[in-house]
Amino acid sequence: MAPLETLIRRARALLPDEGVITDRARLRTYECDGLAHYRVTPALVVIPETAEQLAEIVRCCAEQRIPYVARGSGTGLSGGSLPHAEGVLVVTSRLRAIKEVRRADQRAVVEPGVINLDVTRAATPEGYYYAPDPSSQQVCSIGGNVAENSGGAHCLKYGFTTNHVLAAEFVTAAGDRVRLGGDAPDSPGYDLLGAVVGSEGTLGIVTEVTVRLVRLPEKVVTLLVGFDSTDRAGAAVSAIIAAGIVPAAIEMMDALAIEAAEAAVHCDYPAGAGAVLVIELDGPATEVDAEYADVVRFCEETGAFEIRTAKTPEERVLIWKGRKSAFAAVGRISPDYIVQDGVIPRTALPEVLRAIAELSDRSGVRVANVFHAGDGNLHPLVLFDDAVPGAGEAAEEVSRGILDLCLRHGGSITGEHGVGADKAAHMPKMYAPDDLDTMQLVRCAFDPDRISNPGKIFPTPRLCGERPGRRQGAHPLQQAGVAEVF
Amino acid sequence: MSDSFAGRGPLRSDPREASVSRPTQSISGVRPGRIERPTSTAEVAEVMRAAAAAGESVVPTGAGTKLGWGNPPTSADILLDLAALDQVSEHASGDLIATVGAGTPLARLKDHVAAAGQRLALDETISGATVGGTLATNTSGPLRMLAGTMRDLLIGVTMVRADGVVAKAGGKVVKNVAGYDVGKLLVGSMGTLAVVTEATFRLHPVPQTSRWVSLDARDAAHAAELTQAVLHSQTVPSGLEVDVTAGGVRVDVLVEGRPEGVAGRTAVLTDLLPGSEVDERAPAGWGRYPWEDTADEHLGIKVTFRLSGLADVVEAAGEHGLRGSAGVGVAYVAVPADRDITEIRATLARLRETAGRHGGSAVVLDAPGAVKQQLDLWGPVPAVDLMRRVKDEFDPDHRLSPGRFVGGI
């Protein structure tokens, strides 16, 4: 029997009818994630309802050497859960129980399909919340967050997924179920969980996640500040950081991004602004009050022409609505766009923004800028019209140029969207061959047969078992046709 | 007397001794064959390549303050002294990052960045400890409640692999999800995966004001109750510690921030902890192990637990008392090493059982060699097979610190 047939038979025995999808038309609904221009129809989709079912599917994949790709809500922006044409897509959306919320321990235990915001909803009655808040938090899953090490606007102060995940039940590429980390901190041994978080599903699949809950702040103040230029807004950010203030968030949008948000959600941002900052302070009331006075002063000193402070929760939501809808909003002013995700040292912001503007002027490709200004994470939106011949290519060239700028300033090709299928080719620009080879050692330890989400992150995976640094020509096994490089 | 060097001053010997081929230091009782003192990453790579060619084992060290931690290595042909890699090579204050050599004393890094009003928000739990040693053992103190541990502060690393290949992981920006976070694997790996030669950290601003609010609790249950009250309050402490001694049970809370803010939060805390005292200086023993001055005569045990397990852990520590971060679920117990081994084993078993019941572990960090040999230092380690596979990939010949870590790694 063909390997895939064996897997389908096993899956049908294991799962209810609706949990095994083989129909071509239905398979196609899973052909992409949030990065919709990469499309691959998987050979099979399975939707397990228990961790054991999921592990059994992976075991069968391991036996049959069938590649598998895990998918949560499919909101990823780098093609991290792009299916494999000969592989199975393992969807975790039915593993969505919130198992425990323990106030006394400041912990919640959830399944990977649980929606990010639902963890906060479950913890709020206890006075707690789950801190990492990607813009897609209403739909993205915790499993996906773990895979991508998701951040969000508030990670400037509170850190990323990796700082909030304490333990996980994990299914290895062999289908073994193991516990990584623990309920208590500093589990003895290597920090395997630290390697798994952010590994984009290439090391295995988490089936249960223990997260840290954070006390809801006593006071939250949200400001919307208008400047006539991104330079002035950037100067305000520098002044705030230099004063030792760590706001919960500092977000910047430029004129084009403001225009788009305004068109889409009527967020009523200051008219004529060349840039706005969304600044949020949170914490103990007395602390926030003291910081607020300073932040207002710094904004005034750096030339803010309007400082608006949310007086009600509704006003706060409206301020954030403009920011959080920015990506989709760009669709209102351009038929097509590329969402870029790069990081620079924060102090390089003015220089890099000027260089992006030059790139845009030279190419005639419009770029709207939205970013987490506090930590230098840029999200330039490169606008184009795919109906115009050559426009897509021009936009991609600008998009690549922006990543090159980030690297030239000592930054990163991705701050939170991941490498996925999209940026694997850029990895050698950021890391030397030996750096990438070292990462592959981790891969080989976890998944020597490379069946867990193959083809992501790394442009040229090493053949496991090969001694490092001594690769010359084709591997003997490859030459003999015994093994092949994915 | 312990034959380990734990808790003593820096190991770094007089430069004139560099040519002396018979080292006097020991690694948990094992005397290394010779000492190598490279001064750069390239020289470390040379040493590692030569060691690989000669089939020699290598144990990296910084100031040597924790050379006595872990199991005795099964072999130690070379003690790789990284103390000469002691420069702060970059401090980008506007970006709140610093890059330093692994041999740099934590204190020097702190002094360096303090000039710009910044700090590495990590306690120096043993005087003289280096950046590399702190990374390899993942030590932390009260401030972990605010900023986490080394794993949360490390953003980039340069390492020399067992085969002599130099590689980097992470970078110099705080936010970066490109590729695997290899740095996290190195944190706490006791020098068994690769030799870290340089590390980049995120820094935090030095707070304008710090206040300690301290209270003598009636007993462990009371301390646990107070701890929960502080945890659920709106005071956002930077540290929440307990210190249990023969003299009683003390709860210490650190709040940091702007003067007005700290005043408000201190007022809330003194309401929560009636009878407490407020001080501008840290209480005695803050951020130091309870065995600090008597490491030669004690076992140092690290116990971790869910926050709700505090009272049980205090009870399990019994007459030995404990000190640690109640607000995070980590405590340290000093057990006299001259007790009968049966009694020591029973104490360890009791701590392990209690910690296990509360989702944690009890690990013997430090102990005199003779006692250590008779104990399982780590206790149960989940996923140890996967850890062995990681070790085998990074160091297939088990050249680096062989046997010092969990599961014989």
Image (tube, grey):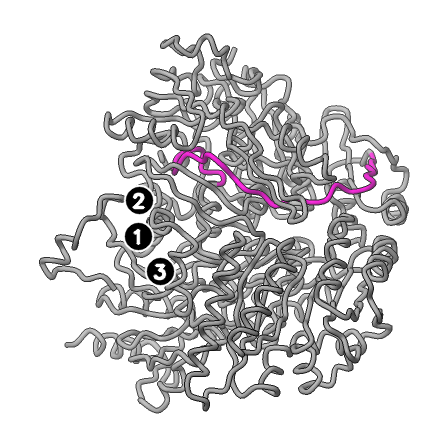
For the residues beneath circles 1 and 2, the answer to whether they share a chain is no
Mark 1 element type: helix
> How many residues crowd around disc 3 within 10 Å: few (fewer than 14), some, or many (20 or more)?
many
In the image, residue A231 lies at what x, y percent?
71, 63
Judging by the rendered image, the residue that carries numbered circle 1 is: A444
| Amino acid type, residue under disc 2 in the picture | Glu
Marks 1 and 3, Cα distance to the nearest angstrom?
13 Å
Residue extending furthest toward the front: A362
| Amino acid type, residue under disc 3 in the picture | Phe
Residue placed most toward the observer, A373 or A447: A373
Which region of the structure is painted magenta? B187-215
The prevailing secondary structure element of the residues shown in magenta is: strand
Residue placed most toward the observer, A185 or B250: A185
Judging by the rendered image, the residue that carries numbered circle 2 is: B393
Asked whether disc 1 touches disc 2, contact meaning CB atoms under 8 Å apart, the reply is yes
> How many residues crowd around disc 2 within 10 Å: few (fewer than 14), some, or many (20 or more)?
many
In the image, residue A164 lies at what x, y percent?
59, 56
For the residues beneath circles 2 and 3, the answer to whether they share a chain is no
In the image, residue A244 lies at what x, y percent?
76, 48
Asked whether disc 1 touches disc 3, contact meaning CB atoms under 8 Å apart, the reply is no
Judging by the rendered image, the residue that carries numbered circle 3 is: A458
Q: Tell me the chain of label 3.
A: A
